[in-house]
Image (tube, coloured by chain):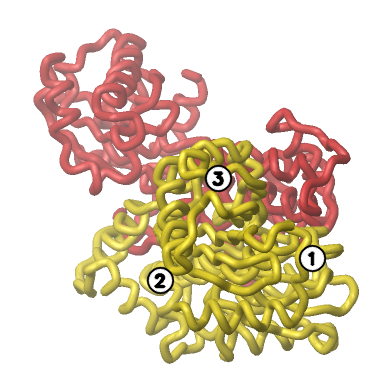
Chain colours: A yellow, B red
Amino acid sequence: MSHEALLLGIDAGGTTTRAVLTDAAGRCLGYGAGGRGNPISAGPDRAAEGVLDAVRAALASAGRALADVSVVVPAMAGMRAAGGSEWLRKRLAPHGFGGVLRFESDLLATYFSGAAADAGYALVSGTGACVIRVRDGRIDGTGDGLGWLLGDRGSGFWIGRAIARAAVQDLDGTGPRTALTDRVLAHYGLHRTGVRHDGRWQELELLVAALYEHPPIELAALAPYAFEEPDATAHEILITAGEQLADTLSAVLREPGPLVIGGGVLARPGPVREAFLARLGAAADALELRAVDDGAVGAAMLAIRAAGGVADDATLARLTRAVAAFR
Amino acid sequence: MSHEALLLGIDAGGTTTRAVLTDAAGRCLGYGAGGRGNPISAGPDRAAEGVLDAVRAALASAGRALADVSVVVPAMAGMRAAGGSEWLRKRLAPHGFGGVLRFESDLLATYFSGAAADAGYALVSGTGACVIRVRDGRIDGTGDGLGWLLGDRGSGFWIGRAIARAAVQDLDGTGPRTALTDRVLAHYGLHRTGVRHDGRWQELELLVAALYEHPPIELAALAPYAFEEPDATAHEILITAGEQLADTLSAVLREPGPLVIGGGVLARPGPVREAFLARLGAAADALELRAVDDGAVGAAMLAIRAAGGVADDATLARLTRAVAAFR
C-alpha cells in the first residue's frame, strides 16, 4: 500500500455523522462532523449530505482530497435493509473517490471504539437497545435491537414509555402516586385541573391525547425525568431497565472479554448501572467495561482493518486521544 | 308521554352498529344492524351511514318511521373527544327526527346490557381494555382504557403484542422457545430459513420488518394463537392478562355489585378468567359476573331511562330475550 493511501472511518448516526481520516498506520490526520447520515431515517439525499459534510471537514482539517482516499468505511444502523452501497458511491465518485467502500454495523463501530480485541461485546442503550457478541472481528450474535414496539428493553424509549405509563396510571388510580406525573404533565404543557369527567381527571384525558399525538419513539424524550432525584416509581423503572439490559447481554454471553458500553442509559454510575451489574452477578467479573461516546474511533479502526493495517490496542489509544483532541 | 313515543338505543361500534327499537314501556319492537358507527375511527359520514343503516333496519322490522321516535341514545366510545352531537343530528333530521339525541359511553351500554342496578361495574377486554364503576346510573370511576401505547393491559392487543414479543425473543435467543413462534411466522407468510446474518436468523429480520409494516393495533389479530393449546409461554401470557384485568378492576372497586363482562378475552372460562378470579380473591365473592355480547340491550335500557321509563331487571330480561330472538 502506498504511503499516500488515506482511510476514512465514518460513524453515520440518526442525528450526527462523524468522519475520522487516518493513514494506513493508524495515525489520525483529520476529523469532521456533519448532520444526519442514516439513509433509512433521513433519506439517501439528506444522509449523503451529512456524510459528505463530515468527510469534507475531515479532509479539510488535513488539507487532503477525497481522491487520496483508498478506503471508506461508513458504519450505520440497518444497512442490510437499505439495500447496497450505490446510494453513497455515486455521490462520492464525483469528488474523485474510486476506492473500497465498505459498510459496517454501527454496533461494530461502537465495539471497536472501546476495544481492539477480536472478541468481546458491545451493548448500546440510547433511544433503542441492542447487544452484539463479536468474534474474529465480526458480529457473531445479536440480542434485542428489535425496536420500540417489540423490544429495546432497557432503552431510553423503554424508560420514557414506562414514565408515561406511570403518569397515566397514577392519574387513573391503577398505579401508585409518583413525582413523575407532574413532570410529564409539565412536559406537555399541562397541569392538574381538579375537574373530573366520567370519573376521570380532565388532565388525564388531555395527557393521553397529547401522548398519542406524537410518534411513539418521542417518548424517549421523557427518559431523563427518571434520573432526576428518582422516587420509588422512578427507581423501580431504572432498576428494571438495568436488569433488562443485563438479561439481553446474558443471552449472547459466552467467553470473557471486553464489554463496550454505548448510549446514555448505562454511561454513568447510578441505579441502572448498579442493577445491571447486580443482575449479571459473577458473570460481570469476566467482563471489562468501557464506556464510549460514539462509533467514530471504531469506524476508523474498521477502516484500518479493511486496509490490512494494524488496529491494535496502541492504535486504539492513539486514535482515541487524537479524536478527543480534534473535538 | 304519548303511547306512540318510540325509543332507539344504538350500540355504535368500530365494526358493527346495532339499533334496538322499543316503546317507553320497554317492549322491544325492532332490531337492526349496520356497519361501522364510530365517527372517530370511521369518520362522520361513514359512521352516520352505519348508524342510519341500523336505524332503518330496526324501524323497518317494526313498520315504523323515524318521525315516530322521540328519544335516540347512541352509545359509542370517545364521544367527548368527537365534539358534540351535531354530526348525527343533522343526518337524522332529514328523516323526520326532532326528538332527544343523547350520546352515552359504550362502556355504560355494556354495563346496562348485563345489569339493571344503578350501581356496579363493567369490564370490557376486546381489542382494548377498560373498566368502569357505575353509581346512580352514571360512570363514577374509570380504570385503564388508555390505549395500546400506554395501557389496555390484559386486552386482545396486549396479548397479541406479548405473542409477537415472545416470538421475536425466541428467535433472537433473549427469550424461551415457544410454539407461538411458528404460528406468528406463518401468520405473516414466513418460515424458518436456517440462514443467519450478523448472528441473527433471517426470518427474524423479515418478521420484525413485517411487524413494523402494519399499524401496531393490528397485533390484536395474533391474540387467538395464545388460546389454542397454550404452551408454557402462551399460558404465562394469558395468566398475566387475567391478573392485569383484575388489578385494573381492583383500582375502581368499592362496594359489592354486578360485574358485567364485555369483549372476547374474559368471555369464556379458561386461563384468563381463572387468573382474573384468583387475583381478585375474596373480592370476587362480592361480584356477580355476567358476560354480554355487546351494548345493544344496554343502549336500549339507556334510552328507556332517558325517556323516564322503567328499566328494571324485568325490562332487561325481556329486552335480552327479544333482541336474541331478532338476531
Disc 3 is placed on an element classified as loop
Residue for badge 1: A133
The chain identifier of the residue carrying mark 1 reads A
Disc 2 is placed on an element classified as helix
- Residue A103: x, y in percent? 65, 50
Q: Amino acid at mark 3?
A: Phe
- Residue A226: x, y in percent? 46, 81
In terms of image quadrants, where is residue B25? top left
Labels 1 and 3: the sequence-earlier one: 3
Residue for badge 3: A97
Q: Nearer the viewer, mark 1 or mark 3?
A: 3
Residue plotted at (45% across, 25% down): B323
Residue for badge 2: A222
Residue A287 - label:
none
Q: Amino acid at mark 1?
A: Arg
Q: Examine the rendered structure and indicate whether residue B78 appears above or below residue B9.
A: below
Would residue B220 be seen by someone viewing this image from the given angle?
A: no
